[in-house]
Image: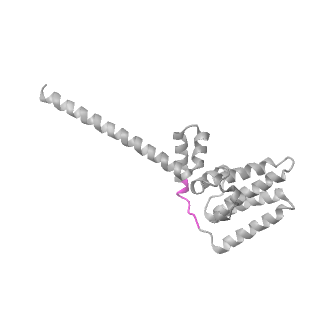
């Protein structure tokens, strides 16, 4: 074997080694990114995989949500805002006995108002859910459940128990948005996980 052939063999082996190392590092990075997204999004990661059909598509979607929310300017609520929102919530609960359907509708509006005060844009429901899932992944399922329950009561006979459950779900999200997760009903802390 002459020196030129030996040199080409060595160059080829080095290139194969570099490509192999690159592939291994790429796979390691992808696994690490998957684990980070699973940890960040919790049950929302699993839901995205089911909805999107594959982990790769779900991870692209969740990464896109994260990039979108990174541009938001979140604000902490002032003590006055917390007190005002809490008083509104107390009125909603008080009104439930007399008019459960109206209470649920007002609870939904209050959630939207609190989200705007915190810095979330006020867009359609699906976009609000996607945005919430980045910072509040463990409670976003309560928002979906509340909306589903409240919509199931529209146009048909009013099911007071479903409306009560909707208010409880809204309360869980409300408490989390106010930064008071311990005030959410204990029975819902692990529900719908």
Q: Quadrant of residue 49?
A: top right
Task: List the single residue furthest toward the bottom.
Answer: 80
- The location of residue 177, given as percent across then percent down, is 64, 62
Image side of residue 152 versus residue 37, left or right: right
Magenta-drawn stretch, dominant element (helix, strand or loop):
loop
Q: Is residue 116 shown to the viewer in this render?
A: no
Q: Quadrant of residue 4?
A: top left
Q: Is residue 139 above or below residue 22?
A: below
Task: Tell me the residue at 67%/59% (across/down).
Answer: 173
- The location of residue 39, given as percent across then percent down, is 52, 51
Q: Is residue 82 above or below residue 186?
A: below
- The location of residue 72, given as percent across then percent down, is 56, 60
In magenta stretch: residue 37: no
Task: List the single residue furthest toward the top.
Answer: 1
Task: Tell me the residue at 16%/30% (across/down).
Answer: 6
Image side of residue 44 versus residue 90, left or right: left
Task: Tell me the residue at 84%/50% (across/down).
Answer: 159
Number of labels in the image equals 0
Q: How is the image coloured?
A: one colour
Q: Magenta segment range?
A: 68-75
Task: Tell me the residue at 60%/63% (across/down).
Answer: 119
Task: List the single residue furthest toward the front.
Answer: 187
Q: Is residue 144 shown to the viewer in this render?
A: yes
In magenta stretch: residue 74: yes
Q: Quadrant of residue 1?
A: top left
Judging depth in this view, the residue of 182 and 74 nearest the camera is: 182
Q: Is residue 26 above or below residue 70?
A: above
């Amino acid at each position: 074997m002459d020196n030129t052939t030996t040199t080409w063999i060595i160059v080829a082996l080095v290139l194969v080694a570099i490509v192999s190392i690159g592939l291994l590092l790429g796979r390691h990075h992808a696994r690490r990114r998957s684990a980070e997204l699973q940890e960040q999004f919790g049950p929302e990661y699993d839901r995205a995989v089911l909805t999107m059909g594959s982990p790769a598509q779900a991870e692209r979607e969740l990464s896109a949500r994260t990039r979108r929310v990174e541009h938001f300017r979140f604000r902490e609520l002032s003590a006055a805002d917390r007190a005002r929102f809490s008083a509104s919530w107390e009125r909603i609960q008080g009104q439930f006995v007399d008019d459960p359907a109206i209470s649920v509708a007002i609870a939904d509006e209050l959630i939207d108002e609190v989200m705007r005060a915190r810095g979330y844009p006020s867009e359609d429901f699906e976009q609000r859910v996607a945005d919430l899932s980045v910072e509040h992944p463990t409670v976003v399922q309560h928002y979906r459940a509340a909306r589903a329950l409240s919509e199931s009561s529209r146009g048909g006979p009013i099911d007071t128990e479903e409306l009560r459950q909707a208010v409880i779900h809204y309360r869980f999200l409300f408490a989390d948005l106010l930064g008071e997760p311990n005030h959410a009903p204990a029975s819902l802390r692990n529900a719908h996980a």
